[in-house]
Image (cartoon, grey):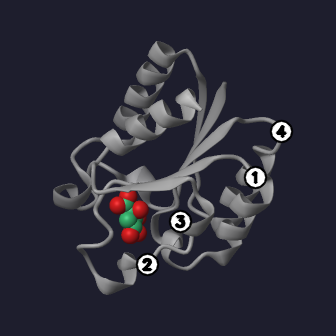
């Protein structure tokens, strides 16, 4: 099995971006834990981070026929990117949406995801653990 992990905009700033909300760990720390888990589960994982919508969409297109699952934290694009939503819908690969914070108990604009209707499911508010749980699920499919 081959799983793609996609981190959206500003997630490269993890560690010093609002640590009380997003945690003290850097993206590198989180990616290290994802890779550690992937070797235990014996699945291949490739991880990408992009700040632009176009690059995220191009990477989603590349998943077609290449990956068995996608874990995506679309960050702020979650709330308004119909283009990312359409890309996920088009490639027909099981996709799990992950958010470090609970998007339902913050600002009103975060309480809507345009991405979740085209995903297998969503994990929100469990911190970095969300990526690990999503990986376990996709590995078990
Ligand atoms: C986030 C939540 C989004 O609302 C926000 O724009 C992010 C991170 C999260 O992981 O909690 O950048 O996706």
Residue beneath the point at 55% across and 35% down: 138
Q: CA distance from mark 4 to mark 2?
A: 30 Å
Question: For the residues marked 3 and 2, what is the alpha-carbon distance in whole angstroms?
Answer: 9 Å
In the displayed image of the protein, which residue is found farthest to the bottom? 108
Q: Earlier in the sequence, mark 1 or mark 4?
A: 4
Query: Which of the two discs, 1 and 4, sits closer to the camera?
Result: 1
Residue at x 50%, y 55% (from the top left corner): 121
Q: Return the disc, 1 or 3, that comes first in the chain's sequence.
A: 1
Q: Which residue is mark 4?
A: 65
**Above or below — where is 135 with respect to 35?**
below
Residue underneath mark 3: 116
Rendering coords of residue 32 (x, y %): 41, 27
Residue 92: assigned label: 1
Examine the image and state in which quarter residue 80 appears.
Answer: bottom right
Q: Looking at the figure, which quarter contains the N terminus?
A: top right
Quickly name the residue at label 2. Answer: 112
**How many callouts does the rendering have?**
4
Which is nearer the N-term, disc 3 or disc 4? 4
């Amino acid at each position: 099995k081959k799983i793609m992990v996609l981190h959206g905009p500003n997630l490269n700033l993890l560690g010093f971006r609002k640590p009380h909300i997003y945690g003290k760990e850097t993206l590198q720390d989180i990616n290290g834990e994802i890779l550690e888990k992937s070797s235990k589960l014996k699945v291949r994982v490739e991880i990408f981070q992009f700040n632009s919508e176009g690059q995220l969409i191009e990477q989603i297109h590349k998943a077609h026929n290449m990956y068995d699952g996608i874990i995506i934290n679309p960050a702020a694009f979650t709330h308004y990117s119909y283009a990312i939503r359409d890309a996920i819908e088009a490639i027909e690969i099981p996709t799990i949406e992950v958010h470090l914070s609970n998007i339902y108990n913050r600002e009103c604009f975060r309480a809507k995801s345009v991405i979740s209707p085209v995903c297998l499911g969503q994990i929100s508010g469990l911190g970095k653990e969300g990526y690990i749980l999503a990986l376990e699920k996709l590995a078990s499919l």
